[in-house]
Each structure stands twice: as C-alpha cells, then as structure tokens.
Image: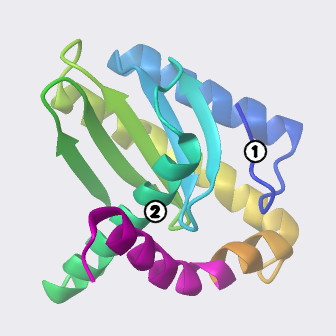
Amino acid sequence: MSGAASWSFREEDAVRIGGLLDRLLAESSARTALLVDRTGQMLATAGQPTRFDPVTFATLTAADFSANDQLARLLGENEFGALFHQGEKDSLYLADVARRVILVVIFDQGTTLGLVKLRVRTVVPELSRVFTDMFSREGAAGPGLRSVGGMERGFVGEAEDEIDRLFGSG
C-alpha cells in the first residue's frame, strides 16, 4: 500500500485501509482495488499488480469522476456515487468515498458486477469512516483537507486539458 504526499496517513490508517481493501477483494473475487483522491493522486493499492502507469491511471480516474459529476448536475443530480466501465476482458467499478476519494475495483469474468457492487456497498461506509477520522484529526480546516479541496478546482481544468491532449480534441 502506498500513500500520497498531500495526505497524512498514519500507520493505523494504512493498516485499516489495507485490511478493508484486502477483504473487499477476497469477498468479491475482484483482482485489484485502488484508492485515488479527487486531485488525481494514487493513495493506495491492493491485490494483483497493475499493468499500467499508476500516475496516468489516477489522473484519468479523477478526470472521469469529475466529468461524470458534471453530467449528473446536468441531469439535476448532485452526483453519481458510482460508475461502471465494462470491457471485453476487464471492467472497472468506481465508487465515491467520503466525497474526497475514489475507490476503483478492477475485475474480470471471474466475478460479477452484482457481487462487486454488493461488496463495495459494504466497504465504502467503512472506508469513509477511516477518511473522516483522518480529516477530523487535522481539524475542519486542516492541511489534509485544505490541500485536497484547494487543488480540486484547478485540477478539473488541468484534467480537461490533459484529456484534450491525449485524444486530440481542442
């Protein structure tokens, strides 16, 4: 499990998060679980190693979630709390954690979307408590919250620029 510089993980936080992610993977038969913050930083990984660049993946995950938040608002929703991307071999299920973090579950045909959703639904409240406890420790205006929240606004524009560069639009 790895931590990002803008978050103040304590050892007990890392142990709690690692245990929750490991349990999620065991109960869902998914391959990999990742935690990405809304600014595009990889916070933690569990399960099988990934075959992609984690920095790029984290950036695109945060951009994906931000874009979908905008789509939700267009439809009159506050947000979409979860997203699903189905591939031929691999699929992604993404869920909001404490409105600051994105849980990404990577799975293949060895399990079902229904089982992944069911297990994610039970672990997200527990992960949210871990992050809420971390935020509380630093105070309502503490450095962890401020750095994540302060970067978020600028990040959306940067993420859109990066997507435009990657896909040649604009």
Q: Residue at x 75, y 51 (%)?
A: 4
Q: CA distance from mark 2 to mark 1?
A: 16 Å
Quadrant showing the N terminus: top right
Indicate the secondary structure of the residue bearing disc 2. Answer: helix
Highlighted magenta segment, given as a residue range:
150-170
Q: How far from the left and from the top, in percent, is residue 80? A: 27, 67
Indicate the secondary structure of the residue bearing disc 1. Answer: loop
Q: Earlier in the sequence, mark 2 or mark 1?
A: 1
Residue wearing tag 2: 62
Image height of 60 relative to 152, above or below: above
Q: How far from the left and from the top, in percent, is residue 107? A: 30, 25
Quadrant showing the C terminus: bottom left
Q: How far from the left and from the top, in percent, is residue 85? A: 20, 45
Say few, some or many: other residues with alpha carbon within 10 Å of mark 2 (under 14 / 14 to 19 / 20 or more).
many
Residue type beneath disc 2: Ala
Q: Residue at x 47, y 38 (%)?
A: 123
Residue at the front extreme of this rendering: 168
Image height of 107 relative to 72, above or below: above
Where is residue 18, by image quadrant?
A: top right
Where is residue 165, by image quadrant?
A: bottom left
Residue 93 belongs to the span the image colors magenta: no
Q: Residue at x 27, y 70 (%)?
A: 168
* Front one among 15 and 150: 150
Say few, some or many: other residues with alpha carbon within 10 Å of mark 1 (under 14 / 14 to 19 / 20 or more).
some
Residue 164 belongs to the span the image colors magenta: yes
Q: Is residue 127 left or right of residue 81?
A: right
* Front one among 132 and 163: 163
* Front one among 153 and 98: 153
Q: Are marks 2 and 1 in contact (CB under 8 Å)?
A: no
What's the mark number on residue 52?
none
What's the mark number on residue 3?
1
